[in-house]
Amino acid sequence: EALPVISLDEPTISMLFGINNSPFFGKDGKFVTSRHLRDRLMKETEKNLALRVEDTDSADSFLVYGRGILHLGILIETMRREGFELTVGQPQVLVKEIDGKKNEPYEILVVDVPAEFSGKVIDMVTQRKGEMLIMESKGEMQHLEFEIPSRGLIGLRSNMLTNTAGEAVMAHRFLEYKPWKGYIPGRSNGVLISKNQEKTTGYSIDKLQDRGRFFVDPGEEVYIGQIIAEHIKPGDLIVNATEPKKLTNHRASGADDASRIAPKTLMTLEECMEYIQQDECIEVTPKFIRMRKVILNEDERKKTQRMQQVEA
C-alpha cells in the first residue's frame, strides 16, 4: 500500500534572475550568456522540488520562485561558485487573488531570545505587521511565536541580530494565505551612487565619510550607477569617489588621508537581497557581489521615474 504523498510547501517569494549587463560583465565568470543561465536553472528544477522557473517577456531574464530568501540565496551562491555571472532583483512575495480579495503568504515566526531583549524583538516584529501568539519563559530565554506576513520577514534577520547582540535564534515556516496586511516600512535611508567608472581613491572616500557608510575600499574598481555606500539621510546621492589628490609643489601624494578611513561594511548575499529596493539589483560574479541601480544612467533613471509617476 502506497504511503501518503508528502506535501511540499508552495513557493512564497519570486526573484528576477537575468544576465549580468554591467560594464564589468565577463571579467570573472565562465558562464555569462542567457542560454547558460536558463539551462542551469532548468537543471536545478529537476532536483530542487520547491523551485519554479518561468520565462519572461525578455529573453535575458527569468522569474524564479522559491520558499524564501535562504532558499534562493543558496541557489545563487551555488551558481556563483560554479562560475556563473548573473543579476538578481529585489525579492517579491507572491500575491494570490482569493474570493476577489488580494491575499499574501503568512508565516509562523519562532524566536528564542534572552529576556532583556524580548521587548526589542516584539517591537520589531509588530512594526512589520506581526501578531504575537505565544510568549513563555524557558529558563533565561524567552520563547516567542508570531504570525507575520512573509513580506515582513525580508530584512528582519539582520536587524534582529543587530538589536539582540547576536543572541536571537529565529526560524519561520509557511502557514497560509491571508488578506493583504497593508504597507510595511522598508529601508529608510538612501544610497550613494558612483558618478564615474574608475578606481576609488582614499582621498575622495575620506571627504565623503560623513555622508554615509561605504561598501567599497580605496582602490576598488567601480562603475556608473553602482551603489557604493549607504546615505545617512533618505534620498539617493550621486558622488565622485574616484577623484585623485591634486599634487602641487607643496602637497605630496603621501598616505595622510588613507589612514583615517573606516573599513568598508561587508555585506553577505542574503543581506544584499534584504537591503535592495525596487529599482536596485545585485550583480553576482564568482569574485564579487555588487549592488547597483537597475538603470545605470542617471538621466534614464529620472525619465523612468517621471513616467511611473505620470502612470500612477
Image (cartoon, rainbow, N blue to C red):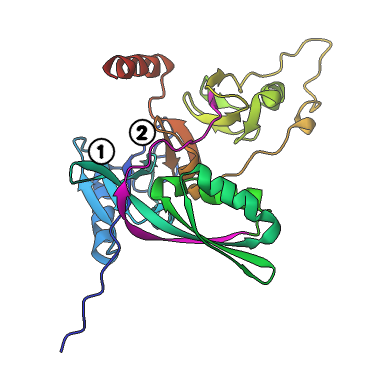
Residue situated in front as seen by the camera: 46 or 113: 113
Q: Is residue 253 left or right of residue 148?
A: right
Category of crowding for the residue at label 2, using alpha-carbon neighbours closer than 10 angstroms: few (below 14), some (14–19), many (at least 20): some
Q: Residue at x 40, y 56 (%)?
A: 107
Q: Give the residue at the far top of this rendering.
A: 249
Q: Amino acid at mark 2?
A: Asn
Query: Relative to 200, does residue 26 appear above or below in the rendering?
Result: below
Q: Which stretch did the figure color magenta? A: 168-193
Q: Which x, y percent locates residue 288?
A: 50, 43
Q: Is residue 98 magenta?
A: no
- The answer to whether residue 266 is above or below residue 243 is below
Using a 10 Å C-alpha cutoff, classify the residue at mark 1 as few (fewer than 14 neighbours), some (14 to 19) or many (20 or more): some
Q: From where the camera sits, is residue 287 visible?
A: no
Inter-mark Cα distance, 2 to 1: 10 Å
**Quadrant assignment for the N terminus:** bottom left
Residue at x-position 31% and y-position 19%: 308
Q: Position of residue 249 (x, y in %)?
A: 82, 10
Q: Which quarter of the figure is the C terminus placed in?
A: top left
Residue at left offset 52%, top offset 20%: 196
Left or right: 270, with 137 as reference point: left
Query: Which corner quadrant of the image does residue 253 belong to?
Result: top right
Between residues 203 and 214, which one lies in front from this camera angle? 214
Are the residues tagged 2 and 1 within 8 Å (C-beta)?
yes
Residue 65 in percent (x, y) is at: 29, 51
Q: Is residue 115 above or below residue 221?
A: below
Residue 269 visible, this angle? yes
Residue occupied by mark 1: 60
Left or right of 70 on screen, residue 235: right
In the picture, measured across the screen, residue 244 lies left or right of residue 29, that is right
Q: Disc 2 designates what residue?
A: 21
